Amino acid sequence: MSALSSERALRHLQVLSEEIGPRIGGTASEKRAAEYLAGQLDRFGYGTRLEPFPVADKFLAQIGDPRNLAGLVS
């Protein structure tokens, strides 16, 4: 396993916060973030698996990109 790297940590934060964006449970962006993190852990030899979970708010579960909510709020 490679040593800790501040540059690598910042890159992960950039991917999660800028490329993937908000990650509300049940949204496509939440799934992308989970897959990204699982892939990173798999590279270090961890046996990850994604498991489904219930989402309490069905409206939020149908949002494609939470950043588009601004046009829905009056």
Image (cartoon, rainbow, N blue to C red):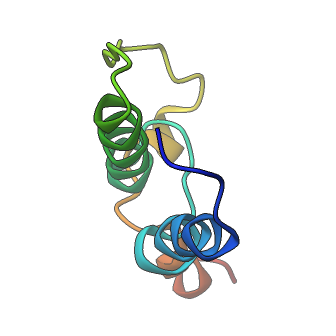
Residue 32 pos. (x, y %): 33, 51
Give the left or right position of residue 2, taking residue 39 as reference: right
**For the point 69% across and 83% down, which residue is it?**
74
Residue 44 pos. (x, y %): 38, 32
**For the point 53% across and 38% down, which residue is it?**
25
49, 30: nearer the viewer: 49
Residue 29 pos. (x, y %): 39, 56
**For the point 53% across and 64% down, which residue is it?**
12
**For the point 53% across and 74% down, which residue is it?**
11
Q: Which quadrant holds residue 69?
A: bottom right
Residue 73 pos. (x, y %): 66, 78
73, 45: nearer the viewer: 45
33, 59: nearer the viewer: 33
Q: Is residue 47 above or below residue 6?
A: above
Q: Is residue 50 above or below residue 62?
A: above
36, 5: nearer the viewer: 5
